[in-house]
Amino acid sequence: MSKQHVITARIDDETVEALDRLARELDRSRAWIVANAVERYVSDELEFIDFVQEGEDDLENGRWITHQQLVEEIRERRAGRKAA
């Protein structure tokens, strides 16, 4: 198991009440739910950042097409499926 760290956060009453309800429903601790939520959020945000970076890298390296080119490509693929 990797080393764990304790962090603190300020959360309003309404959110804490909802967190407590969720903890009861899932039979989990607040800490488990918060840790799980942070892990998911961080993973999702980093995935998005990597996605954007990939697009920026493609633009820098000339790997892009215009909107019109994309529309034409989609039309050609649809026409090919209908012909099959």
Image: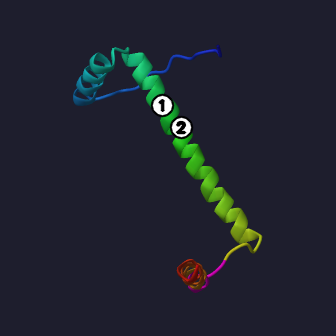
> In this image, 84 relative to 37: left or right?
right
Q: Secondary structure at mark 2?
A: helix
Amino acid found under the numbered disc labelled 1: Val
Circle 2 packing at 10 Å, graded few (<14), some (14-19), many (20+), is few
Q: How far from the left and from the top, in percent, is residue 30?
A: 37, 18
Q: Are marks 2 and 1 in contact (CB under 8 Å)?
A: yes
Q: Is residue 67 magenta?
A: yes
Camera-nearest residue between 83 and 39: 83
Residue at mark 2 to residue at mark 1: CA–CA distance: 6 Å
**52 relative to 78, above or below:** above
Q: How far from the left and from the top, in percent, is residue 56?
A: 67, 64
Q: Secondary structure at mark 1?
A: helix
Q: How far from the left and from the top, in percent, is residue 7?
A: 49, 21
The residue sitting at 64% across, 15% down in the picture is 3
The residue sitting at 37% across, 15% down in the picture is 28
Query: Which residue is at the far right?
Result: 61
Quadrant position of residue 68: bottom right
Q: Which residues are magenta?
A: 65-69
> In this image, 25 relative to 8: left or right?
left
Circle 1 packing at 10 Å, graded few (<14), some (14-19), many (20+), is few
Q: Main secondary structure of the magenta part?
A: helix
Camera-nearest residue between 8 and 79: 79
Amino acid found under the numbered disc labelled 2: Val
Camera-nearest residue between 3 and 27: 27
User: In which quadrant of the rendered image does the N terminus lie?
Assistant: top right
The residue sitting at 44% across, 18% down in the picture is 32
Using the image, tell me which numbered label, if any, was put on residue 42.
Answer: 2
Using the image, tell me which numbered label, if any, was put on residue 38.
Answer: 1
The residue sitting at 51% across, 16% down in the picture is 6
> In this image, 15 relative to 3: left or right?
left
**26 relative to 82, above or below:** above
